[in-house]
Image: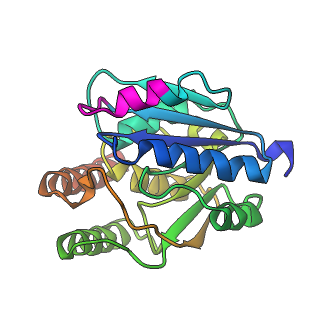
Amino acid sequence: MQKTNSLSVIIPAFNEEAGINNAVTENLKVLKNFQIDFEIIIVDDGSSDGTETIIRDNFLNHANIRCHFKKKNEGFGSACKKGIELAGKENVILVSVDSPLTSEIISLFYQHINNADILVGYRIERKGYTWRMKLNSLMFHWLVSHLFDMKLKDYNWLHLYKREIFQHITIEYSGIFMLAEVLIKARRNDFRIVEIPVEMIKRSGGVATAGSWKTAFQTAGDLFSFYFTIHKRK
């Protein structure tokens, strides 16, 4: 791979003691096999279980890994924003603990890496989703698509960005809505967006916060707040 296609892999983690070690190890293995210029940035979002201890014991002094520990939990979007601020490579990809990168995913993204400013991975199948998570996802997708005139298949999964776009896009939201926020702002700034099908791995442990009512209400609140905010700015 070309050096110009270097990659910062950001892993936000909150109470992921059951999966963080395996997730980071798997990402390391895949990235080393592809022999690309990379770094992994782990952002512990104020975990209250053993996540921070596992990170410190296993990855704190690794040559290809940078770790940041937040004092309190501020949300998925806030953790991603911190990782983006710390990133030093040309491209940035956000990777959840429950879906570490695979050789197939890296190959797909690198096939298109020079064809877009943002590569959006969409889930072929949402594995391990409860009926409530499926309902939340369906409603969220419908609202984003119709309120913001977006036509993507998925708004909150694997995204790879040219890091330079964040010189033009400011992240305002700290929750899951942050992913859609960036896509909406990117389209309004005429950045090129390309979608790629991604095979989802079923979560084996940890806390799936996306399925909680608290997360659903926060995400809906952020969505409508952003909708009315951008209309006021016109």
114 to the left or right of 77: right
Quick check: 120 above or below 134? above
Tell me if residue 101 can be seen: yes
Residue visible at 60% across and 71% down in the picture: 196
| Residue furthest to the front | 57
Looking at the picture, how far across and down is residue 159, in whole percent?
A: 54, 56
Looking at the picture, how far across and down is residue 40, in whole percent?
A: 60, 37
Residue visible at 37% across and 36% down in the picture: 78
Task: Write the start and end of the magenta stretch as one range.
Answer: 46-57
Can residue 110 be found in the magenta stretch?
no
Quick check: 198 above or below 161? below
| Residue furthest to the right | 2
Q: In the rendered image, which quarter is residue 53 located in? A: top left
219 to the left or right of 93: left
Q: In the rendered image, which quarter is residue 173 located in? A: top left
164 to the left or right of 49: right
Residue visible at 37% across and 28% down in the picture: 52
Looking at the picture, how far across and down is residue 51, in whole percent?
A: 35, 34
